[in-house]
Amino acid sequence: MGDTLAQKLIRSHLVCGEMRVGEEIGLKIDQTLTQDATGTMAYLEFEAMGVPRVRTERSVAYIDHNTLQTGFENADDHRYIQTVCNKHGIYFSRPGNGICHQVHLERFGIPGKTLIGSDSHTPTGGGIGMLAFGAGGLDVAVAMGGGTYYITMPKMVRVNLTGRLQPWVAAKDVILEVLRRMSVKGGVGKIVEYGGDGVKTLSVPERATITNMGAELGASTSIFPSDEVTREFMKAQGRANDWVALQPDADAEYDEIIDIDLNTLVPLAACPHSPDAVKPVSELQGLAVDQCCIGSCTNSSLMDMLKVAAILKGKTVHPNVSLSIAPGSKQVYTMLAENGALADLIAAGARILECACGPCIGMGQSPNSKGVSLRTFNRNFEGRSGTADGQVYLVSPETAAVSALTGVFTDPRTAGEAPVYTMPERFLVNDNMVVAPVDETEMNTVEVVRGPNIKPFPKTSPMAEEIAAKVLLKVGDNITTDHIMPAGAKILPLRSNIPAISEHCFVRCDPEFPARCHEEGVGFIIGGSNYGQGSSREHAALAPLYLGIKAVIVKSFARIHVANLINAGIIPLTFADETDYDRISLGDRLALPDVRGRLTRREPLVLKNETTGEEIALNTNFSDRQIDMLLAGGLLDYTRQQSI
Ligand code: MIC
Ligand code: SF4
């Protein structure tokens, strides 16, 4: 039996473990990326490890999230990241250069290489055939130091594409269709590999839209083959030499196959508040729209922008709609300016933003109360826009642009001829906003600048013999990292200050949670299925760590979050029988007797509900490495004990 493309890349990067589904495997990482909202912590962790220079082939730090500088904090963090990168051998993409995933695809990604990034949408790189994973900052720090990256060997899903997209139907509609079929937890423990005849009809930016939003499936990653289309893209970026052809073996076997006929797809929208609440746009036709936002790492390529400019050209945005547009990178922005398309956007009344995450992470442009906002982004979790009752729909750039003109939800197929635009043969290449690090021989001349908002990594301690504490929070299914550790313009500047950001932990679910934690000192969290879906932010583990949470017990976890909990030394546990979730209430006193001894001896853990007197069985299928990490008090302590 042959290998799937993902299996081939895993095999060629395998450091340890057996490639058997469900087993832990270790991978060699060729490239890393960070962004500024997770980057400060990642570099503080890297510094704490004491490795002088990065050992990857290429590591890049991007500034794209915290670009709204309403106080000194974000600017201080940018300065810290710039200096720490300069010293330790990391390339620094300055604010203004664009969104990490878009720029990485354009300028640094290489087919066949492994990439991990401290951002859940790192699988965007799968659009050019990279094996790219979102990870916590600590995992990225370890990889920068030359350490192995561990994942659970995933199942393989093949999405078989046939036919060709019809006019007005976009790559966004392909991934929304996959989300409709698989749901936000359908990809957990799986790699989604695209293949079939339809692949060659999709350009690299379109493929990247699809692999980017594979994160919303909960998938480990998504990947496209590297073919002639990829070669053309690399060539247009002046990087033809980096191209290699990559295909799965003809006799590769997949655990699951999904067939999608591109001819039959229609414009789709993910309704509030989940990326898998997908309906045809035609069913929403006529709903009044307050805002449209075009951009984000999912849909901010030159191609997306040119389409939108062609739709808006010579027209005016509807009086009741605010339309914001953020091109994905300096390359995209400059090319739009040079070919006149930017003028068409401005003339139509679009509010042009800098090339950064912006409204996607709640950095400005929050909609009005109960406002209907059509966004080309990838997440529409409740409150993420910054407006608690905002109604965010995820749509293609075509649907957003056409609806911005009509003022109501509009199926773009009703708008006449599809937009005509031409893609240039060459992209404009100018890497003047990427700062190369100093040579190793000069690293001691660089002083790392730390602002007053930058506080050290929270204190960890080895696992206790026994844990006995109250349930300080009980939540339901599909809790996102935006519930656990909200983002937005007010809270994001605290990303380098765990004590301060912890005061916002879970406040959207229960405003009293931080205070209760301070009162009790230690505690448990109980949750439902797919707990921790969404972002890679390790703050969703570090804030609970700081607040004294010792274990999180749920029906099931999302992949990156469970790794972050272990990295932080918090024990992630699942119920052996999901109905036991109902046998625990907020405030119950729970105990994990002899937890240290039992984990050391690889014995199952038993949870005692001391309030009801019941015993509850738990799953404890940790790898030896994970157990050692938990016993040590997390990855940082574990790494200090080992030599990487
Ligand atoms: C997101 O889209 O939620 C973010 C903001 O990019 C996060 C990273 C973060 O929280 O800093 C992600 O996707 O990992
Ligand atoms: Fe930035 Fe939004 Fe992409 Fe996250 S999903 S990296 S916030 S653009």
Image (spheres, grey):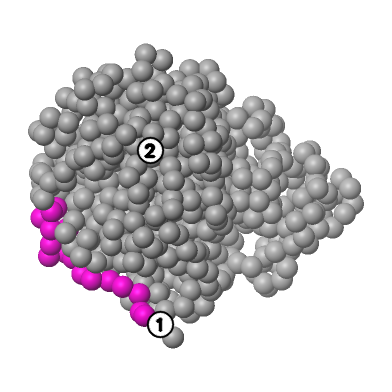
Q: Indicate the secondary structure of the residue bearing disc 2.
A: helix
> Quick one: 24 or 531, which is closer to the camera?
531
> Quick one: 171 or 623, which is closer to the camera?
171
Q: Which residue is mark 1?
A: 251
Local packing at callout 2 (Cα closer than 10 Å; few below 14, some 14-19, many 20+) is some
Mark 2 or mark 1: which comes first in sequence? 1
Check residue 165 for magenta coloring.
no
- Vertical relation: 113 (above or below) 637: below
Q: Is mark 1 within 8 Å of ligand 1?
A: no
Tell me the tag on residue 413: 2
Q: Amino acid at mark 1?
A: Asp
Q: Amino acid at mark 2?
A: Arg
Q: Residue at x 51, y 77 (%)?
A: 20
Residue 38, percent from left and from top: 39, 43
Tell me which segment is drawn in magenta: 234-251
In this view, the mark in front (2 or 1): 2
The Cα–Cα distance between marks 2 and 1, rounded to whole angstroms, is 39 Å
Residue 138, percent from left and from top: 42, 53
